[in-house]
Image (tube, helix red, strand yellow):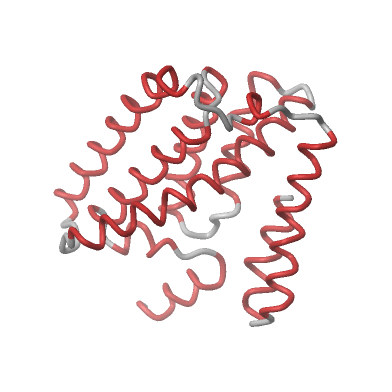
Amino acid sequence: MTGAILALIWIVQPLGASNLDLALRLLIVASMLLSNIAHRDSRERLGIRLDNFATAARIVLPATAVVACAFGLLGLIVARPPLIVQRVALNFVYYLGWGFAQQYALQGFVLLRLRDAGLNRSAPVTAAALFALVHVPNPGLVAMTFTGGWLWCTMFRRAPNLLMLAISHALLAVVTEAMLPGHVTGGYRLGPRYLRWVSGRG
């Protein structure tokens, strides 16, 4: 699955083949869903639930607040970009949906399959490493996605709830974009797009 995503970023997207891009995206999503069906993953195991929302909030929100504050302080040090409130609000709505999709892939597929393979305690750090790998060669995103992925996977094991993780993901993505300049985040660019951006800046 990681290989398919890397192929999408490094091979398919640079070709500009929109039909192939869509087909590969659908194949990736279908493969994850079929994996859930084949392994008989329940909604509770996938974290698509509300019964433990309050428990998950008590675990996830304090850690999210600490990281958000750290990014905020870093932004003050390295000169953050101009803050546009309307854009922040719109971005939060966007990242809430995109964050849910990424957390489903990270938790509902990668982490669960690693645990099923017997990794158990090392599953969170392994999943985080795979999550960071698809963000290569953007060093800022690699560092942030590895750290965030590790935290999210660890917290998911304690209270599996994708909605709460999506909220955490959206909050941190918005704070990061609002507080950290482009040379730190690389404008959230991946693969060849990031390399072209770096080349253009040089």
Which of the 4 image quadrants contains residue 103? top right
Left-right relation of 39 to 12: right
- Look at the picture and state if 144 lies above or below 49: below
Give coordinates of residue 175: x percent, y percent.
28, 48
Q: Residue at x 77, y 59 (%)?
A: 27
Please tell me how many numbered marks the rendered image carries. 0
Left-right relation of 155 to 74: right
Q: Residue at x 42, y 45 (%)?
A: 144
Give coordinates of residue 46: x percent, y percent.
64, 31
Q: Nearer the viewer, residue 199 or 95?
A: 95
Q: Residue at x 61, y 35 (%)?
A: 107
Give coordinates of residue 149: x percent, y percent.
51, 37
Left-right relation of 61 to 79: right
- The outermost residue toward the right is 38
Q: Nearer the viewer, residue 31 or 64?
A: 31
Which of the 4 image quadrants contains residue 123? top right
